[in-house]
Amino acid sequence: MNILLYLIPLALLLGGTWLAAFFWCVRSGQYDDLDGDGWRSLADEEAAPKQSRATKPGD
Amino acid sequence: MTVCCVEPFPSPFQTSPVLSGDEAQRWITVAGPGLKRIELIVPEANCAACIADVETALQRLPGVSAARLNLTARRVSVTWRDGEIEPQGFIDELAAMGFNSRPFDPRETGVFQDGRESRFLLRALAVAGFAASNVMLLSVSIWTGADGATRDLFHWLSAFIALPAIAYAGRPFFMSAAAALRHGRTNMDVPISIGVLLASAMSLFETIEQREHAFFDAAITLLFFLLIGRYLDHLMRVRARSAVSLLMTLMPDTATIVVNGERRNVSTRDLRPEMTMAVAPGDRFSADGIVADGASDIDRSMVTGESAAETVGAGSAIQAGTLNLTGPLLVRVTAAGQDTFLAELIRLMAAAEQSQSAYVRMADRLARFYAPAVHLIAAATLVGWLALGLGWHDGLLAAVAVLIITCPCALGLAVPVVQVVASSLLFRRGIMIKNGSALERLAAVDTVVFDKTGTLTLGKPIMRALPAISAEHLGIALALADSSRHPLSRALAQALPPRGIVPRQVEDIVEHPGRGLSGSWRGVPVRLGNRSWCGVAEAASGADCLEINLRIGDSAAARFAFEDQLRPHAAETIRELRKAGLRVEILSGDRLAVVARAADALGIDFYAAAQLPAEKLAHVEKLRAAGRKVLVVGDGINDAPALAAGLVSMAPASASDIGRNAADIVFMGDSLSAVVEARVVACRTQQLARQNFILAVGYNVLAVPIAILGLATPLIAAVAMSSSSLLVIGNALRLGLTGLALPHRRPESRGFPARAAEPLRRAA
């Protein structure tokens, strides 16, 4: 049963990492424009250089 | 460059707005040292190519450091270095590309608030999901036989994961329950909160005492399921609200006043009586007043429901909100700000909203009986166990188990899930539900009150009869009509080209406001306009319809007759509503003869003409006092108080800003069948919601005896709760599957480009 001492913290750590990543996604505005972001992945790169996450609304 | 879009959003703007001086500061925020930011609403940006087009064009402007288009909200956020460019440049650049835009103020529309709330719900959902999955893993090991020290360890671990998660993710429910209790009411969140809190407290106690049963998994899973429902519900409403805010026109925030012969732009708020304002053709009047100089035609259909344009000259009274059509006017302001006709209507509206007792939603009505009932059963269980001498601890455990089992997971989902499915179904058909309980109220309606101009009709004149004259003469009429903004000229200019008429060469075209147009064709004077302008006796026949006359030289004038055309499917809609046993009425501000003709064509027996806004409001209130449940369908500024007074209200997307804001439901497209569609879906929604309640309550009837007897283990609670929730969700999804008898609409009238994915599929 000693294996639990490693596995449980490990499981929680992995889960916690996912949760932290998700919080970061929400905070940085990645859930604000689900329609647009779907299209951006298909667009050519030329518009990219001057784009910035800093333009998200409301912060 | 052209606008790329397959399904253009109907643009509400006639001209691009001008950002001037202090006014502009309202929308500009500071984005960093030396950086400023503004958000512009771009209703027509609705496809993938628009993203690159809009962003690249704006980023190319000097001084712009970033531009990002949010396709969901149709908003572009532009950041620029202060002093290098003025925000007006962005609007002009977009206009040059064919995109209309206007500044967006998040503080005004509540969109900012919505954004914060959805982010919080999303985070709460993630926390609850994380905790539920981990706790459930631990619980499964316990159920499969972990005992002794291992079980206690797992219980402690569950407690450490679940308790903070419940404290975080349960907040929307706890706060709503607390607010309800403070006002001496109860809603579904009260039993939810009590159940979750008691389950956590008891599980913690069991854990400390090293006993067998802890319900941490039940408590957190419950929150997880309920948060899914709540998040979807919220998302749907935000979507509808932001779609409606896209339709908002830019109200004339500034007016031009004349002081000592000099023209100056001032904010509408600074207008005072006795000022003189200059109003160009195509502008709306921003204050009430009296014409001091000039002649023009004005369109007051939005204000009074009157369908014919009216000729005004010096001395005529003007109401704020009317549209100036043909000539420039100088207007002496008689009332501004709080004293205008518009402000008076807003006061009427607020009063109507207040007098309307708050509608209690079905779930909350049920909660009034449900919450006391389950709390009584739990108390009775405890008393029963004590009376049988089975001890405090086991009695308390059984009582808490009753509360957990009856915790209305399925009940909490029963209505929201059906409504989310229903509103997304309607959204795809161009019908936007702004208010969560609107569908419930719509299903209860037994009387429908329609406005006429702009609601039953399109509010645009359509040519009814072509005079028997040569194609050449029709070509002259077309050439003249092309150069005027008057609605009848527009209608003529639209009606003739499809009949193969081409404009002829007419020179020296001059518009004479209030009368018509003149010009010369091969040296012969030609005139298009009203009767006296073309030398027709005023008393001739057909005086109650809209008409325009053409006179060439000295020959007799030819007459083009117009009428305000009924919306597509208006007659079918009225027939369907009456077949469903609803009483249908028309309340219009238009003249009796016109209203009577429309009522006749639609087969409506109850109609009232020449109604003032206050009279409309009084009529709707009288109906309500008589116990009728009224749906008000209207579009004009004058309908707003009646819309606010109705049990539920609908407005077409073409309605005035104030009308759209007052309505609970807004529909896109011309077809009136949206009214029937919304009602059919609402009735079906209500039916499914009731079924869901019966399913959820039925499950409780089965499960509660098990809990009373003390047999509800955490395993049974988890299985029962999840299965009942899935059952309810599955039942709700039937709404989208079963063939509803929805009226057929032409594809173009469906019109609302809700999903940007469609163009791709079509292109592929």
Image: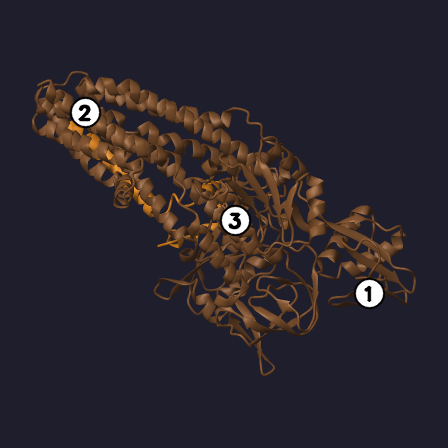
**Can residue B133 be spotted in the picture?**
no
Name the tint of chain B in the rendering. brown
Q: How far across and how far down the image is residue B282, in percent?
A: 64, 63
User: As shown in the figure, which amino acid type bears the numbered disc 1?
Assistant: Ser
Which quadrant does the C terminus of chain B fall into? top right
Give amino acid for label 3.
Leu
Q: Name the residue under label 3.
A: B643
Return the x and y of residue B214 as percentages of the image width and height: 16, 25
Count of numbered circles on the image: 3
Query: What chain letter is assigned to the residue under label 3?
Result: B
Element under disc 1: helix
Classify residue B291 by image quadrant.
bottom right
Q: Distance between the residues labelled 1 and 3?
A: 40 Å
Give a yes or no on whether discs 2 and 3 share a subunit. yes
Question: The residue under label 2 is which amino acid type?
Answer: Ala
Q: In the rendering, what colour is chain A?
A: orange
Residue B540's disc is none
The chain containing the residue under callout 2 comes to B
Q: Mark 1 lies on which chain?
A: B
Determine whether the residue tagged by mark 3 lies in a helix, strand or loop.
helix
Q: In which quarter of the image is residue B633?
A: top right
Q: How dense is the environment of label 2, judged by Cα within 10 Å: few (below 14), some, or many (20 and up)?
A: some
Marker disc for residue B532: 1
Q: Is mark 2 on a helix, strand or loop?
A: helix
Q: How crowded is mark 1: few (under 14 residues within 10 Å), some or many (20 or more)?
A: few
Q: Position of residue B174 (x, y in %)?
A: 25, 40
Residue depicted at 24% across the width and 18% down the height: B705
Residue, disc 2: B380
